Image (spheres, grey):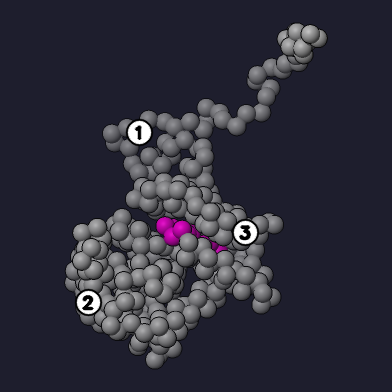
């Protein structure tokens, strides 16, 4: 039997490996970037400065700096949100940032309309689907269906978008909890609120008052309004996708291509995706593709909204570049 390769195998000699002084090597992490302990009497600003200047904190600080720049340049700062943002109790923070000029437009999917309206009307939302689906009661709240479908009907008649129409209709009911409603706050402040439906995907779409023509007309108007807002982002604007894994990333990408298809420049923009997992569509359609080729900068912030959005708000208000 002939000899095998293993019989002739000897360990590689390492005595001539080249080395260098550790202090001379460029490194990605240094003590200057480390966190510092928070004291009992620390201020919020102290806390923000105590965070490690590494990875997500670094991204959050740069994103906040870009949003401050967008405000100074009077460029759109668009928040694209899913219903989870409402259900995690963040509306008061978004309303406050709206008043401070860090939210100049909101784009929401259909679930945003449902949860925001219900909270404004009765102070609660988010039913137990498991407990009601078996008997076919899930999504059957009468007031919700009437409001959303009635708003779509009036909006179609008046030629306005679904977001504006819903805010108008909700305020007309003088809801007890209007102060916690993004729809109400946006309508009162004349901040654009666009609504982007997947027809059949929201509870209101199977109510007796539902009309596909009205829903389609008003949400298409909102798509074109969003596209105009995206056009105005050129030269420093920002778009944040928060808690929408499919609908809004797809809508935003189509708005971007529409703007560029019509010959408009769309560069020097900032995009960001906030979610507790980084999904394909937000990463591709929000963070990467619209900013590719030097057109801007995209950020991915991973974590629960009830933690990351308050941190962003604090960084915008109390942080420093």
Where residue 188 appears, x then y in whole percent?
A: 33, 76
Which residue is painted at 77% across and 12% down in the image? 4
Select label 1 or label 2 by which is in front: 2
Viewer-nearest of discs 2 and 3: 2
Q: Label 1 vs label 3: CA separation?
A: 39 Å
Q: Which mark is residue 143?
A: 2
As drawn, the label of residue 289 is: 3
- In the displayed structure image, the side of residue 216 where residue 75 appears, left or right: right
Q: Are marks 1 and 2 in contact (CB under 8 Å)?
A: no
Question: Label 1, label 2: how many angstroms apart (C-alpha)?
Answer: 48 Å
**Image point (26%, 60%), residue name:** 129
SS type, badge 2: helix
Tag 2 near tag 3, CB within 8 Å:
no
The residues colored magenta run: 237-245
SS for dot 1: loop
Q: Earlier in the sequence, mark 2 or mark 3?
A: 2
Residue closer to the observer: 208 or 38: 208
Picture coordinates of residue 71 (x, y %)? Answer: 50, 63
Q: Which dot, 1 or 3, sits closer to the camera?
A: 3
* Distance between the alpha carbons at the discs numbered 2 and 3: 40 Å
> Residue at point 34% right, 76% down?
205
Rendered position, 49 above or below 26: below
Q: Earlier in the sequence, mark 1 or mark 3?
A: 1
Numbered label attached to residue 38: 1
Q: Tell me where residue 124 sits by quadrant.
A: bottom left
Residue under the point 43% across and 37% down: 51
Q: Is residue 37 visible?
A: yes
């Amino acid at each position: 039997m002939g000899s095998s390769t293993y019989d002739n195998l000897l360990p590689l000699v390492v005595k001539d490996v080249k080395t260098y002084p550790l202090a001379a090597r460029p490194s990605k992490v240094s003590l200057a970037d480390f966190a510092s302990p928070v004291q009992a009497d620390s201020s919020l600003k102290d806390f923000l400065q105590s965070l490690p200047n590494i990875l997500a904190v670094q991204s959050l600080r740069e994103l906040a700096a870009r949003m401050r720049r967008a405000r100074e340049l009077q460029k759109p700062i668009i928040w694209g949100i899913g219903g989870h943002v409402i259900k995690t109790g963040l509306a008061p923070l978004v309303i406050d940032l709206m008043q401070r000029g860090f939210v100049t437009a909101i784009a929401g999917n259909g679930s945003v309309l449902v949860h925001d309206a219900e909270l404004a009307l009765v102070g609660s939302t988010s039913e137990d689907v498991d407990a009601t689906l078996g008997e076919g009661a899930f999504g059957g709240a009468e007031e919700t269906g009437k409001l959303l479908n009635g708003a779509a009907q009036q909006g179609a008649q008046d030629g306005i978008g679904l977001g504006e129409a819903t805010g108008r209709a909700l305020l007309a009911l003088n809801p007890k909890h209007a102060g916690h409603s993004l729809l109400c706050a946006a309508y009162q402040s004349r901040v654009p609120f666009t609504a982007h439906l997947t027809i059949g995907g929201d509870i209101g779409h199977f109510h007796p008052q539902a009309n596909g023509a009205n829903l389609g007309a008003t949400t298409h108007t909102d798509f074109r309004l969003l596209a105009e807002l995206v056009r105005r982002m050129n030269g420093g604007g920002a778009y944040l996708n928060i808690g929408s894994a499919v609908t809004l990333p797809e809508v935003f990408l189509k708005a971007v291509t529409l703007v560029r298809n019509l010959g408009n420049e769309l560069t020097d923009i900032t995009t960001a995706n906030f979610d507790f997992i980084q999904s394909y569509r937000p990463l591709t359609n929000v963070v990467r593709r619209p900013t590719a080729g030097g057109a801007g900068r995209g950020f991915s912030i991973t974590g629960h909204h009830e933690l990351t959005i308050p941190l962003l708000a604090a960084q915008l208000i109390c942080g420093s570049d």
